[in-house]
Amino acid sequence: MPNMFSAGSSAVGYLYQVRYALYLILKKIDLEISIEKLDDVAFESQGTPIELLQLKHHLNQSANLTDGSSDLWKTIRVWSEAIKEREIILPGVMLTLVTTSSAQDNSISSLLRDDIKRDPISACAQLVNYALKSKSDTNKSSYESFLSLGPDQQLALVESIYILDSTEGIVEVEELIKKTLLLSTREKYLVSVYERLEGWWLQKTINHLVSGSQDTINGSEVRTKLQDIIDQFRNESLPIDYLYDDPEESNLTQDNRLFVNQLKLINVSSIRIKKAVRDYYRASKQRSRWVSEELLSIDEIFAYEKRLFEEWEEHFEMVNENPFKLNDEIEFQERGKLLYNGLINQSYPTIRRDCTEPYVLKGSLHILANKKPLRIGWHPFYSERLKIHKEDGEEVV
């Protein structure tokens, strides 16, 4: 039995607003957009509203936009109140109702589509007549708001209304966005670009709503972000997705992963070990995502790890080529730190020429230091101290 109090439909409605707003701003990139400020979605130009949109999403694909539809009358009420409060001045602002419902031929809503049958004068007369005669308690407040306007205001309102019915639902809007992105994105990267853009947009709109929706989101900012994402998919680059991701806090005294023990061997501070754990976490997630999205091959990862190994090998020999002076643990640790600091603070080698995010290099070194049998280490006698002997190339997690 369906839960009559389920919030699923409302949640989809809010997500629909956010996704549809992204679709709209990609089509009107030179404008500014707001969500839940002047309306569900609003476009502004230099601080002046030019279009307000009400969005209505229905999970029932057969929903109809009848003359008594609450979607229609609630929308009219919102705009009627905005006129009375002088939040909008008509004419001059387009008022658009976007709905997945369908308006039947000869209905009031059908007269407000943007087509050759558009007739706002007739629609206004029918709306007034319907509001005067209807006995609906559900729409009563909406009728009162509309009828409280003067005749000239009523007509100005209706002349500004455009109804876009039978629109795509939340799933289909995703495809509309992807079609728009195809104008600037190579098809093989389309899904990856879309996911990153929508993820950024969702966080952007959350911040927008949390701040009270007082500021608009500039279309040029969306354009800049999109171009930044696309640039990461050039042949010599890779997208960076986990710059601000952090692993769950762990107890380092109980963390027995090899790369952590490698750092403990050279007496690295707990703060630096936590940073190493963070880089390991980010690099592991990043490399896994690159491979799953077919942006990077396993062969490229193997080739990169070979370059890292050769870089480590040369530095290891440089640090330890001179005989030990004291031949005690303090000297061993100091040489280990010298090796570790030298490698972890450099910016080469990169996995791809223009992919220079430090956590990729640092985390990849820790991934290598976590493999059995030990591929690399920091302590001059790391292998003997850890005494690891297992199948080649296995990473300990």
Image: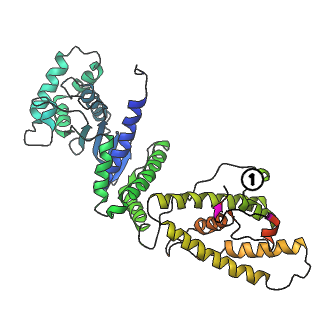
Point out the image quarter for the C terminus.
bottom right
Total numbered circles? 1
Residue 387 in the magenta stretch? The answer is: yes
On the rendered structure, is 172 left or right of 216? left
- Residue bounds of the magenta highlight: 386-394
What's the residue at 43%, 62% (across, down)? 294
Estimate the x, y position of residue 374 in percent, counting from the top left: 71, 67
The answer to whether residue 256 shows anywhere in this view is yes
- Residue 9 shown in magenta: no
Q: What residue do we see at 18% from left, 18% from top?
A: 132
The outermost residue toward the left is 116
Q: Is residue 335 left or right of residue 107?
A: right
Residue 196 falls in which quadrant of the image? bottom left
| Observer-nearest of 63 and 330 | 330
Residue 306: which quarter of the image? bottom right
The answer to whether residue 117 is above or below residue 311 is above
Where residue 350 sits: x, y (%)? 55, 74
User: Would residue 316 be found to the left or right of residue 288 on screen?
Assistant: right
The correct choice, above or below, for 265 with respect to 71 in the image is: below
Q: Position of residue 308 (x, y in %)?
A: 62, 74
Which residue in the structure is indicated by mark 1?
255
Main secondary-structure element of the magenta-colored stretch: loop
Q: Residue furthest bottom?
A: 322
In the rendered image, the quadrant that contains the N terminus is top left
> Is 147 positioned to the left or the right of 307 in the image?
left
Q: Residue at x 73, y 60 (%)?
A: 258
Task: Answer with the quarter of the image where residue 125 lies.
Answer: top left
